Amino acid sequence: MKRLISWRSALVIAAMMVLPVILLVSNFHSGTELVRLRNAMVFNVITVEQSQWPGDQFPPSFKQENAVLPDAIARVIITPPEAEDPLTLMLRQAAVLNLDKRRRGGAISADISTTLAGIQQQRGYCADYTEIINVFGHALNIPVREWALAFDGFGGHGHAINEIWDQQARRWIMLDVFNGFYPVDQQQQPMSVLEFKQQLIADRSQITLVRLSDQTFGFKSDAQALDYYYNGRHQFYLWWANNNISYDKQPLIKLAAKVSPHLEQLVAVISGQFPQLMAIAEPDNLHMINNMQRLKYMLWTLFFYELLLALLLLAMLITLFTRRRSRKK
């Protein structure tokens, strides 16, 4: 037993832990590929029908926000007038984000209050904007959820958008605040995300983009915008949560966020606080879904492998230090 538990065997265990991680990072070293790893760990699959639940009947597994608004958010929330439809109300609320001013870019990747301040200074990427719209929906009592689409097999090259629920019309409405528009059909009715996606494939000439501001419209033309979304038509997915305030308040996540955004997300995934990714399955994306599911299995297997070796290494080190102390006595 003494030969088995030695400093040399501890080094072997440490090497067994480090080598798989080095191999993983060498193959997934770019920012978008690291996002792919994160996405794979929370990857799930649903049908179109399973995504069509109404906004007044969120699934029990969907993490809904119920936290008190941070002061920085509460100060900018408008007083809703009576009988105003959710889209008009959300657009009036979103005006506090200075949507008529050109953005200077740069991801914020911070807590909600910091993200709001950054957006008001013309910073931020799409995911920063969708998080703020999620919080605005909570503040205004408008059901809201977050969609995304990818262009690289559900990896990090993609885009995020929102959907808000119109209770009177009993329909979801797509809203891309980052790119500054929402789509309507030939009858000038706002479209849901999946209606927009289906119409892109069937006949894009039936889609009109209503711009929030010419200054911040994210494309050179409507045609370019439609091409952009068409390229991701087989990689739409839902984030299964809108609890951005509650997420920020988790102690472990707050601590990890002080080190790096990547560590924060890893801690959130392992602790079950990161939202699940629900990819919409269709015949044309099954190969991409299968790839992500294999990656998910591999990553979780690697996680438990690393955890087991870490516990073994810890036990060995405790034994070795105990031996050293007993010899000194």
Image: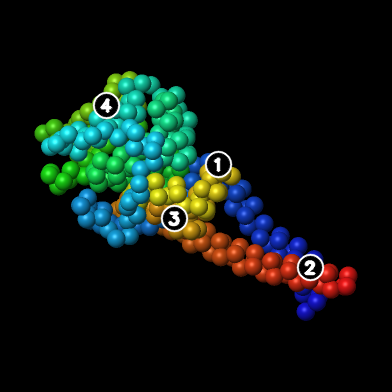
Q: Which residue is mark 3?
A: 273
Q: Which residue is mark 1?
A: 30
Asked if marks 2 and 3 touch (Cβ < 8 Å), the reply is no
- In three-dimensional space, the C-alpha distance between marks 2 and 1, rounded to whole angstroms, equals 39 Å
- In three-dimensional space, the C-alpha distance between marks 2 and 3, rounded to whole angstroms, equals 36 Å
Q: Vertical placement of 145 versus 47: above or below?
A: above
Instruction: Tell which circle, 2 or 3, labels the residue nearer the N-terminal end.
Output: 3
Q: Secondary structure at mark 1?
A: loop
- In three-dimensional space, the C-alpha distance between marks 4 and 2, rounded to whole angstroms, equals 65 Å
Badge 4 density bin: few <14, some 14–19, many ≥20, Cα 10 Å: many
At 33% from the left edge and 32% from the top edge, which residue is drawn? Answer: 76
Three-letter amino acid code of the residue under disc 4: Leu
At 20% from the left edge and 30% from the top edge, which residue is drawn? Answer: 208
Q: Which residue is mark 4?
A: 212
Q: Secondary structure at mark 2?
A: helix
Q: How many marks?
A: 4
Three-letter amino acid code of the residue under disc 3: Gln
Asked if marks 3 and 4 touch (Cβ < 8 Å), the reply is no
